[in-house]
């Protein structure tokens, strides 16, 4: 096996995603209990989004609301990273959820936490 093939296999993985009606009911149930913070800001770089999320948004999510709705995917991805990071370190004991919804022909990225 060539080194190129070996490197390719080491950095590859497979993921199987199954969607069923029970899973959708779980997410719909959790989304109904969310206090949403709707973000109007958009950023041109991941760096700006990460700085904004880590200094402004994610403390807000943990303090006064448990959901975040934005049209900027960079903000949603940054928030998911921050929440997953603090959950990994044992600081957050809530479940983290994410979804995408189309509302009035606009894509919204949703990130929220729940106790379940």
Image (spheres, rainbow, N blue to C red):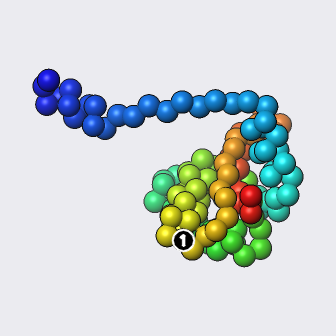
Query: In screen coordinates, is 60 left or right of 80?
Result: right
Image quarter of residue 28: top right
Please tell me which residue lies in front, 107 or 68: 68
Rendering coords of residue 77 (x, y %): 56, 52
Image quarter of residue 82: bottom right
Image quarter of residue 92: bottom right
- Direction right: furthest residue: 32
Reading the image, the residue beneath label 1 is: 90
Q: Is residue 45 above or below residue 22?
A: below
Q: Is residue 42 visible?
A: no
- Quarter of the picture holding the C terminus: bottom right
Q: Is residue 37 visible?
A: yes
How many C-alpha atoms fall within 10 Å of the one at disc 1: few (<14), some, or many (≥20)?
few
- Quarter of the picture holding the N terminus: top left
The residue depicted at 13 percent of the width and 31 percent of the height is 3
- Direction top: furthest residue: 1
Query: In screen coordinates, is 44 left or right of 38?
Result: left
Q: Exactly how many numbered labels are in the figure?
A: 1
The residue depicted at 39 percent of the width and 34 percent of the height is 13
| Helix, strand or loop for disc 1 | loop
Q: Is residue 6 above or below residue 45?
A: above
Rendering coords of residue 25 (x, y %): 82, 40
The residue depicted at 13 percent of the width and 25 percent of the height is 2
Rendering coords of residue 62 (x, y %): 69, 72
Q: Is residue 113 above or below residue 7?
A: below
Query: In screen coordinates, is 69 left or right of 3?
Result: right
């Amino acid at each position: 096996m060539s080194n190129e093939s070996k490197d390719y296999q080491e950095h590859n993985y497979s993921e199987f995603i199954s969607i069923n009606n029970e899973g959708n009911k779980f997410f719909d149930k959790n989304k109904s209990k969310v206090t949403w913070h709707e973000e109007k800001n958009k950023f041109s770089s991941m760096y700006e989004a990460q700085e904004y999320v880590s200094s402004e948004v994610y403390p807000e999510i943990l303090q006064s609301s448990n959901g975040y709705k934005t049209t900027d995917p960079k903000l949603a991805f940054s928030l998911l990273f921050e929440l997953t990071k603090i959950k990994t370190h044992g600081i957050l004991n809530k479940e983290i959820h994410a979804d995408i919804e189309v509302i009035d022909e606009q894509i919204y990225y949703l990130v929220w936490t729940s106790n379940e």
